[in-house]
Image (tube, grey):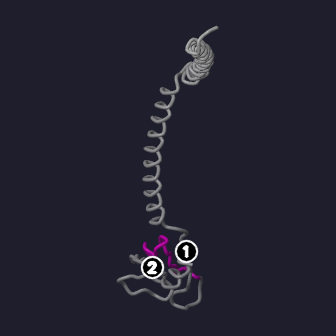
Amino acid sequence: MLSLKDQALILSAGVSFIVAIISLILSSVAAVRTKKLRNRYRSLMKGESGIDIESLIHRYNDRVIALEQEIERMAGLIKNHDLRITQKVETAQVLRYNAFGEKGNDLSFSVAFLDEKGTGAVISSIFGRDESRVYAKPIVEKKSNYALTNEEQEVILKQIK
C-alpha cells in the first residue's frame, strides 16, 4: 500500500495535470477568440473599399475643415449682402400734384428714393406755366437739412410705410 505521502503526491500531480489541461483549453479558446477579433479589426480598419479607417477619418476631417472655412466665407458674404440690401432703395414713391392750384393737370411731382432706414433723396419737379424747376434734397433717417414741402413730406411718409 502507498504511504500517505505518496498518495498526496499522486493526488497533487493529478490535480496539477487537470489544471494544466484546463489552462491549455482556456488558452486555446482565448487564442481563437483573439484571432477572430484581430481579423474583424483588420477588416474594420480596411473598410469595404480597401481604404483604411484612419485615412478615411483624416479625409473626412480635412473635408470638415474645408466646409467650416466655406461656411465662414459664406457668412461674411451674407453679412455683406445684408448690409448692402439695407442700403438699397426700396420701391420709389411718386406723388403728382398741381403746384400752383391753377387749372390744368398735375404736372408737378415729388419722388422719394429711400432705403429701409429712411436715407436717400427726394426729387421734386415744380411745373409752372413759364418754367419748370427740379430740386433734389438729401434725406438722412427720414429728415433733411433742407426745408421740405408738404408734398415731399407726404411722399417720404408713403415711402416709409
Badge 2 density bin: few <14, some 14–19, many ≥20, Cα 10 Å: few
Provide the major secondary structure of the magenta segment.
Answer: strand
* 143 over 42 or under it: above or below: below
Q: Residue at x 45, y 39 (%)?
A: 66
| Residue 98 x %, y % | 55, 86
Q: What residue type is labelled 2?
A: Ser
Q: What stretch is highlighted in magenta?
A: 106-123
Q: Nearer the viewer, residue 121 or 142?
A: 142
Give residue 64's mark: none
Is there any visible trace of residue 39 in the rendered image? Answer: no
The residue at the point 50 percent across, 34 percent down is 60
Tell me, for residue 132, which label it has, or none: 2
| Residue 134 percent coordinates (x, y) | 42, 77
Q: Are the residues tagged 1 and 2 within 8 Å (C-beta)?
A: no
Q: In this rendering, which labeled residue sits more in front, label 1 or label 2?
A: 1
Q: Position of residue 71 (x, y in %)?
A: 47, 47
In the foreground, 16 or 96: 16
Residue 37, quarter of picture = top right
Marked residue nearer the N-terminal end (1 or 2): 1
Q: Residue 93 carries which label?
A: 1
Q: Identify which residue is drawn at 50% across, 31% down.
A: 57
Labels in figure, total: 2
> From the image, which quarter does the C terminus lie in?
bottom right
In the foreground, 42 or 12: 12
Vertical order, 107 against 87 (above or below): below
Q: What secondary structure is marked by label 2?
A: strand
Q: Along the line of sight, which residue is nearer the eye, 104 or 124?
A: 124
Q: In screen coordinates, is 48 left or right of 63?
A: right
Write the residue at 53% across / 81% down: 155
